[in-house]
Amino acid sequence: MKKRFALAAMAAIIMAASGFPAYAGTWQQDAGGWWYQNEDGSCLKNGWNWVGGRCYYFTPEGYCLVSTTTPDGYTVDGSGAWVVNGVVQTQGEDTGTVSVSDLTLSLPAGYALQDSHQAGDGVYLFHEQGNGGIGILSREVPEAADFRGQVEARSQEIADAAMSGLGVPASREAKSFPTGTWFAYCYPDGSAMGFQGALYAYIRVNHTKCQMVLFTGSTGVNPDEIMMNNLK
């Protein structure tokens, strides 16, 4: 009884995380150039499209124009992004914050608000290159208030039980950040939850909340640095 509610909520968060749409789309390249493949297998075509907060012009065949002037008279740079006087034009801001419950994340480079996806108890963010993501999930467990001291004292055990379905992590340790103590799990292969590449999961039981921060893919971000510097 003393850990049942928190464990059930943590397991539910794990299940919700398994529905994390790992990639909203991916950039692809062949001899003809670059194109952007959507999650459903289709690709962007026929004009301008926003991807990762930047605007790109795609041909009828789906290739992104680069280092040229588009048919409607605009300039794109070597990456294909629309520029004015050499400055990349963005949709809103490429940086900002997202909040889930009492957690607020300052977006790392390469992540944009318009590439976020709200679902259930969390929010998912996608890297502009389509090769990684960040998920923040939080679930309220009011019943845990009756067992607060017992649940928090056994939070490591609760987190371990909730993560057990993913197999043995390459590393597991308690880490301290400005937001408190989190239990960090590293899985070099995240395929058990439907992710490509590595999976890093940070979990905590915070009063009556069960919370998780996920990092997937290979975007070059350091999860510990994000937890330390970007999460408040």
Image: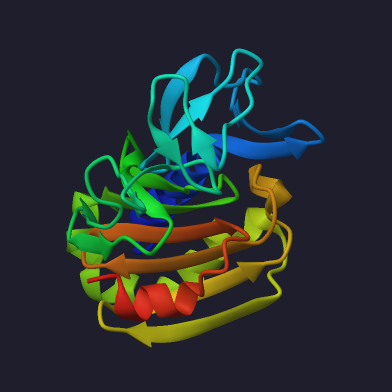
- Percent position of residue 97, x then y: 22, 57
- The number of numbered badges drawn on the structure is 0
Residue drawn at 37 percent across, 74 percent down: 227
Which quarter shows the C terminus?
A: bottom left
Give x and y (percent) for residue 138. Answer: 30, 52
- Say above or below: 106 vs 153: above
- In the picture, residue 107 is in which quadrant? bottom left
Rendered location of residue 202, percent (x, y): 46, 68
Specify whether residue 154 is in view.
no
Report which quarter residue 146 is drawn in. Answer: bottom left
Rendered position, 219 above or below 43: below
Query: Which part of the image, by quadrant, shows the N terminus?
Result: bottom left
Q: Nearer the viewer, residue 180 or 86?
A: 86
Colouring convention used in this rendered image of the protein: rainbow
Residue beneath the point at 82% across and 35% down = 31
Percent x, y for residue 143? 22, 52
Point 38% across, 62% down: residue? 3
Q: Residue furthest right?
A: 31
Q: Specify whether 78 is left or right of 5.
A: right
| Closer-to-camera residue (202/104) | 104
Determine if residue 87 is in view. Answer: yes
Foreground of the two, 87 or 143: 87
